[in-house]
Each structure stands twice: as C-alpha cells, then as structure tokens.
Image (tube, rainbow, N blue to C red):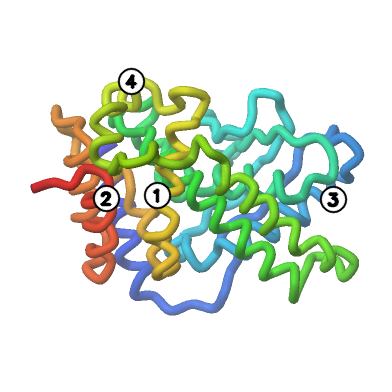
Amino acid sequence: MRYLKTLLLVLLLFLSTYAQAFVAPATVEVESQEWGDADPKDVRAVLQSVIEVISPYVAKRNFGNILVRNDPKGPVSLYEKGPTDEYIILLNVKGRYWAQLAYQFSHEMCHLMSNYDLEPNNASHQQWFEESLCEAFSLFALDKMAEQWANNPPYPQWQEFAPKFTEYKQDMFKQTHRRLPKGMKMPAWYQQYAKTLSADPYAQGRDLNELVANQLLPIFAENPATWETINYLNLEDDSEDKSLDKHLSDWQKNVPLNWEPTIKEIKQILINPS
C-alpha cells in the first residue's frame, strides 16, 4: 500500500506540471435500467455533466470508465472493482430527481478523488473527515451544476432546471443539525465527538459529518481551486498515530506548497492546535 501511495504522489506531481488539452476525467456507464420514470440515457447525461463540472478539481487525473448502478445500498463507492478494474458506484435515486442524483454522484466522485481505497474501512480512524469533506464538495458541486445548466445544459429544455440545484443545496445547508450548538466553537465540538467519529465515520446517521461539512464549505469558497487538495488525502505513511492532527498534517505535507495555508486553516478551525 505504501508503494501505491508513493506512486500516486509522484504521478500527481507530474500531472501538476504537464499541460494538456481538456480530457474528461472519467466516463460513465449506467448499468442499471431501473431508475423509476427516469430514462437511463438521461441519468447518464446528468452524471456526465457532474464529471464535467468537477473536472477542474481532479488534479488532471483520469478515473477511466465508472460503472454506476441503482441500488438501495447506495450511495456508496465500492472497494470491489469491475471486471476490467473499473470503479463501481452505487446510487439510490428513483425518478427524475436530477439534483439528488448530482448530489449523490459528486459525493462519491469525491471519494475517488480522495483515494478512499488506499485507507479502506476506516483504517486511518479518520474516515469521518473524508466523509465530511465529500459532503462539502457535493454541496459545492450543486452550485457548479446550476451555473453549468444555466448556460450549457445537456439538453436545451433542461436549462429551466438549473435553479433546482441551488435550491436543493440551500435546503440542506440550512438544516438545523448542520449548525454548531449556540456558543460552542468547533474545537470544543470536535473534542466532544472525537471518539465517536473515530469509531464510526457515519455516526448519528451522518448528521455529524454534515455539521462539519458546513464549517468546511466556506474555507474552500474563498478559493475554489483548493478543492484540488482532495486528491492528496489518504496518502500518509503507515503509523501508529491515528490522530486527526497527524492525518491533517500528512495531508498538508503532501499538497503543493501554495495550498498548505488551506490545510492549516482547516486544522485551526477543527482542532485549534497550539
């Protein structure tokens, strides 16, 4: 596993200096035919639109062909790969709910970007942070989808749907469980839930992840290009130290120098290290 992490870091360094014409970072193969009243071809059009809007943030990586299935077990990115080593993503949407579809798929694409399969099954004890980061990324992606569809939707008649992405995002962002308790700062909140989160990345039905996501989103909003830092997550050396401080410090060490201040700010907000 250490070899794979080192190889990926070298590849990311090479790609960051390599100029190339735009190439979609992934293609989508919709395997399931049962999407309620949604045509699988339309589902694929939505998912490819997500790929297009997140493409500036994937560090020029190519994830190949991604197999997408509709499954009640979703949304989830499987550790198991397809017959020719494809990533497999399960979504759970029935009907023409394009905003929900984009929200779920962008979250799962964030897991691929974050190298989720190099620290599988909460091996880092900090998978909850990846979950929170991907929740924040999916909210950001909804805004980007609104912008994209307002100007260049997959089909002209879908342009009128563009505001729905923003509405979906705003409805979630305003949920009360996503707010810190009155008078509580984030480091105190984290200390209260640190053991819970370390043991269960999805604790309390993801409510804790969603609260953290709301705190992370404004940091990246200041400079959206820093979403590319996701690609440097989960590349730390194997260590007995499974603390959040170590996890974030390794992330900071691996990102390009100009993005280190973003990781420092995240550390400051979450744990306020001395």
Quadrant holding the N terminus:
top left
Q: Earlier in the sequence, mark 3 or mark 1?
A: 3
Which sits in the foreground, 216 or 97?
Answer: 216
In the drawing, what numbered circle is on residue 269? 2
CA gap between label 1 and label 4 equals 21 Å
- Residue 257 in sight in this render: yes
What's the amino acid at mark 2? Ile
Residue 54 image position (x, y, % from top left)? 56, 61
* Left or right position of 201 against 244: right
Badge 4 local density, few (<14 within 10 Å), some, or many (20+)?
some
Q: Quadrant of residue 154?
A: bottom right
Residue in the image at 44% along x and 40% along y: 211
Instruction: Provide the residue designation for mark 1.
Output: 215
Disc 4 marks which amino acid?
A: Ala
| Secondary structure category for the residue under label 4 | helix
Q: Amino acid at mark 1?
A: Gln
CB contact under 8 Å: marks 2 and 1: yes
Q: How far is the residue under mark 3 from the one under mark 4?
A: 40 Å
